[in-house]
């Protein structure tokens, strides 16, 4: 083997034994440079990727699942409406179509109106009679009892109207504050001493918005106009107007 080839072989073995050559150390006083990192690849802007993990969950309820959250009032009204539609002969808010059911309903309405009259609830009595008469009038000729109840409802309606306007007129009269302080009795003509009046008043004389029509030994009768109607009210000597109740005449 030639000497040149032996020399080449020795150099190769020495390189393998020594390994890699050491990296050159930086000069003193200088900062070693870091290798540049490759710029990360930018992700596409996806709004769904920015959500939290639990926010990505979706809930798909099974078919025909009964939810615990519901509108109880709407459900009951819906059920009631369904029952009314399913029940034959029943009209929502009214009596039944058959005579027996209509007669029973009319009796119950009559008792309700009578309770309003007894409690002096004139407005409620008027509203009830108006609504009841609209439903009973077309059926009067079908049954005698229904006809009798209809006539009673008409009388109660007239009574409530009269009582209501009377109490309204009395309230207006009481608001005048008339107070009889005394009576100057005389066979020729008595005089009434009214509080706030400069002199005693005789019959047919005006006192505020009313007229004296009678003077007795202990009371004075007044004529008062209200709503194009005439009403007569009394005042006793020393009577306290503020202590009176609605509808009370004495």
Image (spheres, grey):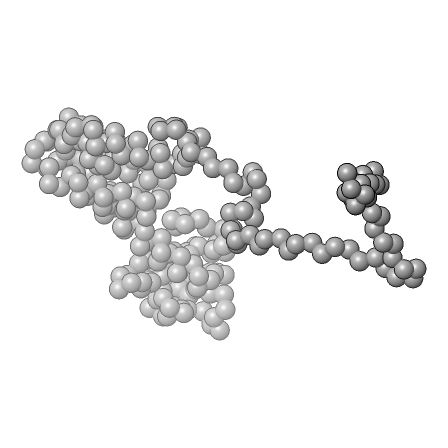
Q: Is residue 90 left or right of residue 50?
A: left
Task: Name the foreground residue: 183 vs 181.
Answer: 181
Location of residue 151 (image quadrant): top left
Task: Name the foreground residue: 115 vs 40.
Answer: 40
Q: Is residue 26 left or right of residue 118?
A: right
Q: Position of residue 225 (x, y in %)?
A: 31, 64
Q: How many marks?
A: 0
Task: Name the foreground residue: 189 vs 7.
Answer: 7
Location of residue 121 (image quadrant): top left
Name the quarter where the N terminus is drawn. top right
Q: Position of residue 25 (x, y in %)?
A: 87, 54
Q: Does residue 111 show up?
A: no
Spot the residue most to the front.
Answer: 2
The residue under the point 42% across, 66% down is 191
The residue under the point 52% across, 54% down is 45
Q: Does residue 176 show up?
A: yes
Q: Is residue 87 above or below residue 201?
A: above
């Amino acid at each position: 083997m030639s000497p040149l080839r032996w020399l080449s072989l020795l150099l190769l073995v020495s390189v393998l034994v020594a390994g890699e050559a050491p990296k050159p150390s930086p000069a003193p006083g200088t900062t070693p440079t870091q290798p540049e990192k490759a710029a990360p690849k930018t992700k596409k802007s996806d709004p769904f990727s920015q959500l939290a993990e639990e926010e990505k969950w979706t809930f798909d309820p099974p078919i025909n699942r009964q939810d615990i959250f519901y509108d109880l009032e709407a459900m009951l009204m819906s059920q009631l409406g369904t029952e009314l539609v399913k029940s034959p002969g029943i009209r929502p808010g009214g009596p039944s179509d058959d005579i027996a059911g209509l007669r029973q309903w009319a009796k119950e309405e009559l008792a309700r109106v009578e309770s309003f009259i007894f409690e002096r609830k004139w407005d409620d009595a008027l509203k009830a009679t108006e609504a009841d008469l609209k439903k009973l009038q077309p059926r009067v000729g079908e049954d005698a009892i229904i006809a009798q109840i209809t006539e009673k409802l008409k009388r109660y309606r007239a009574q409530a109207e009269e009582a209501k306007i009377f109490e309204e007129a009395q309230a207006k009269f009481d608001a005048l504050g008339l107070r009889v302080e005394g009576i100057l009795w005389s066979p020729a003509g008595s005089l009434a001493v009214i509080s706030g009046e400069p002199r005693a008043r005789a019959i047919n004389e005006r006192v505020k918005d009313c007229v004296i029509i009678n003077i007795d030994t202990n009371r004075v009768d007044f004529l008062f106009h209200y709503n194009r109607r005439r009403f007569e009210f009394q005042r006793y000597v020393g009577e306290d107007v503020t202590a009176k109740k609605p509808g009370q005449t004495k």
